[in-house]
Structures are given as C-alpha cells and as structure tokens.
Amino acid sequence: MRAHAMPQRWNRDTSWPRTGPVSCKIGYYRALSTDDGCSKCPPHSYSVSEGSTSCACDKGFFRAETDPASMPCTQPPSAPQNLISNVNETSVNLEWTAPVSSGGRSDLTYNVVCKRCGPGPSSAAGLAPGAPRTCQPCGNAVHYSPQQLSLRSTRVSITDLQAHTNYTFEIWAVNGVSTQSPGPQQAVSVTVTTNQAAPSPVTSIQAKDITRHAVSLAWQQPERPNGVILEYEVKYYEKDQNERSYRIMKTASRSADIKGLNPLTIYVFHVRARTAAGYGDFSAPFEFMTNSVPSPIIGDGANSTVLLVSVIGSVILLLIFIAVFVISRRRSKYSKAKQDSDEEKHLHPGVRIYVDPFTYEDPNQAVREFAKEIDASCIKIEKVIGIGEFGEVCSGRLKMPGKREICVAIKTLKAGYTDKQRRDFLSEASIMGQFDHPNIIRLEGVVTKCKPVMIITEYMENGSLDAFLRKNDGRFTVIQLVGILRGIASGMKYLSDMSYVHRDLAARNILVNSNLVCKVSDFGMSRVLEEDPEAAYTTRGGKIPIRWTAPEAITYRKFTSASDVWSYGIVMWEVMSYGERPYWDMSNQDVIKAIEEGYRLPPPMDCPVSLHQLMLDCWQKERAERPKFSQIVNMLDKLIRNPSSLKRTGGETNRPNTALLEPSSPEFSATLGSVADWLAAINMERYRDNFTAAGYTTPEAVVHLTQEDMARIGISSAAHQDKILTSAQGMLSQMQQIQDRMVPV
Ligand code: AMP
C-alpha cells in the first residue's frame, strides 16, 4: 500500500511564472534544471500537487544524494545468504551468496564486522538467540583480504585471529541508501572457534658436520611454535633428482644426523615442526654437499704415510669443494669433515614415507598438499558405475588443458554431508595422492571448490577383482593368475615400503583395468570401520573384515604390513578360486575359532602346490614368520620364470576343496591330532568307528584313502565320501608341502 509522505507544496503564483511552461500534473514532475517537458514520477515515487519539480519516494524507498530525479526510488538490500565459514587454525574464510534483493540498485557492497566473544554456546552454527555472550570489536590486529569494507566479492579471508577463541562475524549488505534506513536486517552472522595455529616455519638450518655419507643438521625452534613441539620432520633429496623421491626423517630434537648419503652430492633439506595442531610449513630449502673424504683405514696395517697423504689429499679436495660451494650457495654452511660410513637403518632409500593426513590439524591442508585441484569444467560425467560410502561413483572423461583426454572414475560426495564426512571422503585423496606406482590406483585430482566435491582417479575398465573373477570363472591360465597376484604384491610392497598399512586388502578392493593390470585401491581412513560390508564388530568394539584379517589384528588391533601379508594370502586364495568366498558360509565366529585352532584354507581347485604353500606362509600365526611383500614378489617372479614349478597341484580333482586344513606349521603331524579330531573338524565324526575298525588310525593312513576304500569301510553316502576324500587330499597336499619346505632350495 502506498503511504503518502507530506507532499511538497508550491506557490504557483510566486514560484512558477505564468509565462513559463505549463505546470506538470499530479504524478508528474519537471526538474528545475531542465527546460524539458513533464516526466512521469519514476517507480516508487509520487507527486501530489501540480507543478512538482521532483517526486517524493514511497515509504520505505529512498534516494541517495547523487541519484538523479529520474531514477526510481530504491531500498537497502536484504541480508546476504548462505554464509559458510571455514576455520583454518587462526584464519577464517567466509563465503556467502548475494542477497535476494539488491534494493533495486547496482552499488551493492559488503562490510565485515568482527567481534571477539567470550564463552557462549559451543554450537558453531550461529549465535543462539538470547545466549549470554559478551563480545567486543576485534581491533586492528586482525587482517582482512581483500578488505573489510566495501567488498565487491562474496568472500573474505580473515587472518591473525587469536587461537582457541570464539569469534562472531557479521556480513552486512550495503548500498547507496543503506544509511537512510533503519530498515530490515541486512546482515548474516556466523560464530566460529579458532584452532591452535601450527608452528611457524623453521627459518635456518645449519650443517654441523659433513662427511662422505652423512650430514649433521641443527636448527632453531620456530619463531612462533604455537604450542609444544612434538617432533621435527626433515625432508631431503638429491638436488639433481626429482623432488618427488624425497626421504623423510623424524626427530624429537633440534638436530638430525642424516646418513646413508652419496658422496660429493648436493642434497636439499627442509625442516618442519609438529605440535598438537599438526605440521607447520616446511622451511625454505637449504643445500649442503657431502664430501669426498674416505673412511679411515683403521687396524689393517696400513702404512701411516699413505694414510697421511690420502687424508691431506682429501682435505685439499674438500677445501676446493667448500670454496666452490660457499660461492654458489649463500645459505650453506660447512664444518670439518668427520668420517662416517654407517648406513642409516631406518631409512628406506629412495622411498618416501606415507604421511597420515589426520596428523594435520586441518585435513584440508593435507588435501592441498597431496591432491591437485581440478576445475570442474574439465570433467564430463558419463554414467554411474557404483555406489561408494559417500555417494555415487561415476565414469567420465577428464580433459586438462594441454593434455589428452582420459577416462576417469569420479567419486562424488553426496549432498547434505557433514564436515566429518567431507574430511573422511577427502582423506582418501590425501592418501592416494602420496602414491605413485603402477599397481596403486592413481589419483588425478580433486574438486573441492564447487559442489559436488569429487575425487578423480584413473578408470579401471574391469571394475573390482572379486566380481571380475567370478564373471570369468576358469578362463585364465595359471600364469595369468600369478601375473595378477604379482601385480597386487608389487603394489603392496610399495605401500609397505612407504610404511602404509592398508588394513582392508581384499579382492573387492583391487581394481582391474582392460590390460588385466590389478591396482590396490580403497584408501579412505574410515572405510575399514564404516564402509566395508564385510566388516563386523569385534569384542573390542572395532569393525573388522574378519575373513581377511590376521588374528593379532582381530584380537588386539595390531595392524602392520605383516597383517597385510595375511590378507594378501587370502587374496591369493580368492584369485586362485576365481572369487570364491573365503571360508565359504562359515560364520565369522567359526572362522576365528578355526584359525585359532590352527586350521587354514585348503588349496583351491587346481591350485599349484607352490602357491598354496605361499598362502600358508602368509597365514603363519607368528607374524614375524610371514614373508615380507618383497619376498612374495621375488617368489612369484621365480614361479613366473619357471612355469613348470606351477604344474603340480595338491589334489588332481575336479571338486573344489571345501574343508579347512589342519595347522600349517612344520609341527603339522604333531598338532594334527587324531583321526577322530579330523573327522570332528569336518563334521564327519559319525564315521569314527568305521575308521578305527578298518585300522585307519593316523592321519598318514587316511590321506591315501580312495572312494573304493570308503565304500568298503561302510561310508556309502556319495556326498560324505566326497567331503572326506577332498579333505584327505588337502591333508596330503599339506604334508607334501611341509616335506618340500624341508628340502633345501
Ligand atoms: P568404492 O567406493 O571405492 O568402493 O567404489 C565403489 C565401486 O565403484 C567399486 O566397487 C567399483 O566397482 C567402482 N569403482 C571405484 N573406483 C573405480 C575406478 N577407478 N574405476 C572403475 N570402477 C571403479
């Protein structure tokens, strides 16, 4: 409804000469400065008397001082919408969307108001109405990027806030008439709590000692530790090598002896500190060169003159290198050489160590560090190929500028996710992004700047290995199957070299491409607990895929590369049985019990003895006795090079072995127990008396049983004959394997 303000009244006799133009009608105006005719009052304005020289604004509408009379009257904007905050240590990024109404003007800008607040409700969703909270302006110490006032963009970064402090931010939408209106609410607000800041970077590194194979480094605590420093991480690599093949050493002190280096080689070192808030940034690079002085010749009767000459020669050489180096490397420091040829035990030369993204206070930082941000416009989603824990998995194409188009898999994060879900979802990318191996699924990048949030990986045409094997039952040669196993072992060797423990290695988590290359996948941090449908709750409350997991991991959550080796043995069994379910339809409890009692899976049909033996080795109860992945790769390589070693199978039978084998240790015979125990284990104890009466009283005697023998001793059911025969043959194969193992290679 239009409410009339007090109209301007003109005295026609005095203000408007009778000889001048005709005065304007009501609802029209003629500006004093023009000779033009009358104009209709612009929208949201009016005139209530004839001869008006301007129109007054409707109630709630305004005109800025600089607005021409011909411009419609306007309003202040409504409040900005969808304010999102993202806390990163002591910085906050705010983003919002434009107000529904700009008030009819085009001079919309935003002002940020920052208030530091005392303790209040812990909810970060916004201020609870009426909640008691004392707030004060943030002051000048806080910085805004691009600026605090008259912002044209809908985002702002606020830095240099105090750690562990509540802040309320208001975003005000403002235009040219905002000052004239007490108006409706024009601001949105959000309350956040800042985190502890990570330590500032280490600013200087000194080399205290440099030898042929070692550099002793020392550094000062960062200027702003922002907490107790828990450890330092030294990253280093040969200057001439690709930075990606760096090595990491961790130390609790402010020094480190980096050993196992090559002589006369320039190394680049970076150091960063870690507190409970996570890692700070790495220091700038510091370069030092190892020297050429050889190790001392001690106690071998060497002539002291030769020793002296060689030391003097080396010192001269060293001085030359120092001179060259000091000139070219301003920041490097040298000290006198000290002989040291010890190899560093805990280093994995040339291999990086996996960094757990959850050691970062802000997991987004890990995503930024390990995953490339991809512009969503480079991705074409084509079809849905699966469902993951966090949303659909699609296939599509990725075309990065200057690169050829490739097929990709696209994992999406479904709408309505929580912060934790987003973090967990992206943790997979932070992990995958650290790996670079032909048998590990390759991360192309992530989309985090727009929705849906996506993880882009290489596309594996044949999907997951378990389904692929079931679809192709019996179609591959043994060599092809061993090739598959070799690939998986090689990927796992890489992961274990990087100190990454997978915890959920299973055929369902291996992907196969069109060339039958298998790649290890599924690296999300929560997946073992949450996503895997095979995971079951243990008595300790954890959720674990029982059939694939080593006993020590089930019982006391001891997950190591050795427990991954156990799972690898199960994957071997899945592969050789074309996707059969390990332990068939046994319950999880029965599986745990059987394993504890020493039973193991028998060889799948037509499985070479040597492969089943390798499985049994992977299932050693003592984890130290299991082979390492490097040994598994070597073993499979040997088998591939010598295919005749794959010829002998345990039971030349067309029936699959479906009974568990007795213990796989060399103490097999001793622990096997009686025939009665064996019959009980395979649920055939009803025939105990038949066996005893016929004189089959030892395991060695029953392993040679034939069908005729069984009919003779009174076992007439074909199904029971089958079951007993299969199990007996399995036992025989295991005995042979034990004998094989005793033969020196
Ligand atoms: P995940 O969430 O990783 O378990 O993925 C769910 C399903 O999507 C898998 O079981 C696969 O069938 C499919 N999938 C995931 N990643 C890929 C990929 N890189 N290539 C092809 N299929 C994939």
Image (tube, helix red, strand yellow):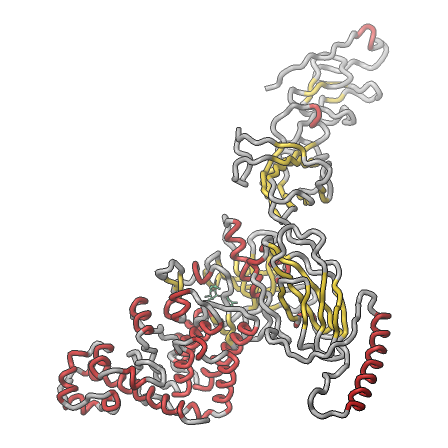
Residue 5, percent from left and from top: 67, 14
Residue at the (72%, 87%) spot, across then down: 297
Between 226 and 162, the residue placed more toward the observer is 226
Asked where in the image residue 443 lies, by quadrant, the reply is: bottom right
Residue at the (69%, 91%) spot, across then down: 300
Between 122 and 190, the residue placed more toward the observer is 122
Residue 634 visible? The answer is yes
Residue 352, percent from left and from top: 62, 70
Residue at the (67%, 66%) spot, across then down: 234
Residue 692, percent from left and from top: 15, 87
Residue 407 visible? The answer is no
Vertical side of 469 occupied by 284: above or below: above
Apparent side of residue 623 relative to residue 206 in the rendered image (left or right): left
Quarter of the image for the N terminus: give it.
Answer: top right
Vertical side of 215 occupied by 75: above or below: above
Apparent side of residue 298 relative to residue 86 in the rendered image (left or right): right
Residue 457, percent from left and from top: 56, 65
Asked where in the image residue 201 lies, by quadrant, the reply is: bottom right
Asked where in the image residue 251 lies, by quadrant, the reply is: bottom right
Apparent side of residue 596 relative to residue 185 in the rendered image (left or right): left
How many discs appear? 0
Residue at the (66%, 72%) spot, across then down: 245
